[in-house]
Image (cartoon, grey):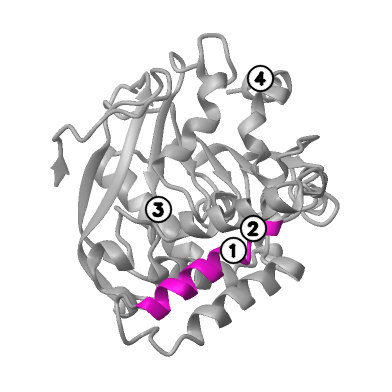
Amino acid sequence: MLYTGSIGVIELDTILNNIEYFYLDDFEFTNGKVLENAKVEYVTGGTPQYDDEGRIINAIIFCHGSGGNYGSIRKLNELSRPGGPFDKEKYFFISMSGLGSPESCAPSTTELYYNFPEFSIEDMVNFQKKFLEECFDINHLKGIMGNSMGGFVALTWGVLYPDFMDFIIPMVSSYKNGGHNYILSKVTDEIISSDPHYGVDAYSESLTRTLKLSTQVAFSYGLSREQYRNMSRYELDVAIDDYGDEGLFSDIYDIKFLNDAMLNYNIEDQLDKIKAEVLIIAINQDQYFPPELDAIPLSNLIKNSTLICYDSLLGHVGTNELVKIKDEIGEFMSKF
């Protein structure tokens, strides 16, 4: 059922409307487990267009990264103005907090914590698909965008349901969790699993320390090496401590389950199933997904793909500077 109460307005131009909640009667995971009243947090924006049967035909969904939520669509703010690549008068945007993320169906939100069903990237796709069908009666998307882990989701959409969308735009992402990213995911898993209170308590002082440490372990990958080199030791000490403190607003079970979903991600041998046109966006200074290891091989594996690489000292979070490639994105979007 649709919750229509006004929760608040995101302060990002006028692209988005109020936060809303929708409840799936039930959601079945690929492992056969079922959760009832599965909550979906989402926002919409832009201008819907309809076919003769009253279905929306110009929807673009945005899939956030592992630490994000519906608000990650802020990255498109500057590009959504009239005449921009994602002109809000031309497209209808839907941004959800995905399966496993706080305020949608997640270990913390359901209060199941360590008893929450294990899930995969495929489950995250199916969760979104069921939501789109039940809430909006959408059976075809104009496109799917995904940032970082959201790129995993977007590409998996294309593999599982190749006729469901016209285009896919994975940003700072990849077709598998391998190499140093796999090691990072594995270390995160070991840090959390080794806490004797994990799987026993919902919260404890020990789990709080573990939560901060599991957050800090990823700090050195976020920005570019050049950006870190330009910071003093004092600035680095403050930054890594602040980063860990920010992680305390997360839930350790949400982090663990999302991390597990990413651990096993690998669709390399299924990319030939993708029919949609694909725009791959990469950042040369990205330490998580260096273009030579991820974006370039991905572009070689996908037919009808276009690759854009650009510079940003922000590294992995440099998709906050998409305005740098506004013209290139506009050229791609002119086809849709």
Q: Could you tell me which residue is drawn at 15 percent across and 35 percent down? A: 4
Measure the C-alpha gap from mark 1 to mark 4.
Answer: 36 Å
* Quadrant in which the C terminus is drawn: top right
- Say which element carries label 3: loop
Mark number, residue 95: none
* Marks 1 and 2 close (CB-CB < 8 Å): yes
Q: Nearer the viewer, mark 4 or mark 2?
A: 2
Q: Within 10 angstroms of label 1, few (less than 14), some, or many (20 or more) residues?
A: many
- The residue that label 1 is drawn on is 216
Specify the amino acid type for callout 1. Answer: Gln
Q: Nearer the viewer, mark 4 or mark 3?
A: 3
Mark number, residue 219: 2
Measure the C-alpha gap from mark 4 to mark 2.
Answer: 32 Å
Specify the amino acid type for callout 4. Answer: Gly
- The residue that label 3 is drawn on is 98
User: x and y percent of residue 242 in the render?
Assistant: 54, 53
Mark number, residue 330: 4
Q: Within 10 angstroms of label 2, few (less than 14), some, or many (20 or more) residues?
A: some
Vertical placement of 221 versus 32: above or below?
above
- Say which element carries label 1: helix
Magenta stretch containing residue 131, yes or no? no
Q: What's the magenta region? A: 205-220
Q: Within 10 angstroms of label 4, few (less than 14), some, or many (20 or more) residues?
A: some
Measure the C-alpha gap from mark 1 to mark 2.
Answer: 5 Å
Specify the amino acid type for callout 2. Answer: Phe
- Which badge, 2 or 3, is on the more N-terminal residue? 3
